[in-house]
Image (tube, rainbow, N blue to C red):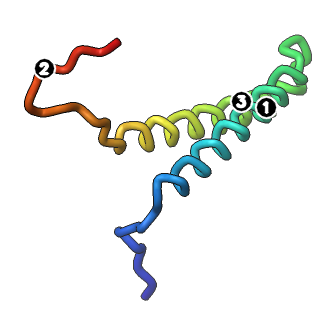
Amino acid sequence: MARYNKTFELSIHDVDLIEEALRARSRELCKMRRALSDENPANMESVSVIEADQRENEELLGRLHNQKIFYRPGATPYVSG
């Protein structure tokens, strides 16, 4: 039986490409959503599918963001700006 690979070896560049592809997909979904009018009841099924895809896409981008480790110096207090 096949098993999932739980370890990935992705570079920072790979993650950047994935994030940029997800953002491009978000833009396309947004354009599709705008093209459908809320006034036409026949489009409501398509609108709900697009909105579900947008939600899934944003959640994935959020999970990727939450796995990043941002640099913060440990010896001195961090002051941004």
Cα separation, mark 1 vs mark 3, equals 5 Å
Considering only vertical position in the picture, is 80 above or below 54? above
| SS for dot 1 | helix
Q: Are marks 1 and 3 in contact (CB under 8 Å)?
A: yes
Instruction: Decide which of 78, 63 is in the foreground and name it.
Output: 78
Residue under label 2, please give it: 77
Cα separation, mark 1 vs mark 2, equals 52 Å
Q: Position of residue 48 (x, y in %)?
A: 71, 29
The residue positioned 59% from the left and 50% from the top of the image is 18
Q: Quadrant of residue 69?
A: top left
Considering only vertical position in the picture, is 10 above or below 57? below
Q: Residues within 10 Å of mark 3 (few under 14, many from 20)?
A: few
Residue 71 shown left or right of residue 14 in the figure: left
Looking at the rendered image, the quarter that the N terminus falls into is bottom left
Residue under label 3, please give it: 48
Q: Position of residue 33 (x, y in %)?
A: 80, 25
For badge 3, the amino acid type reads Ser
Residue 41 shown left or right of residue 76 in the figure: right
The residue positioned 42% from the left and 67% from the top of the image is 9
Instruction: Of the two numbered discs 2 and 3 on the same chain, state the one appearing first in sequence.
Output: 3
Residue found at the very far left of the displayed protein: 75
Q: Are marks 2 and 3 in contact (CB under 8 Å)?
A: no
Q: Are marks 1 and 2 in contact (CB under 8 Å)?
A: no
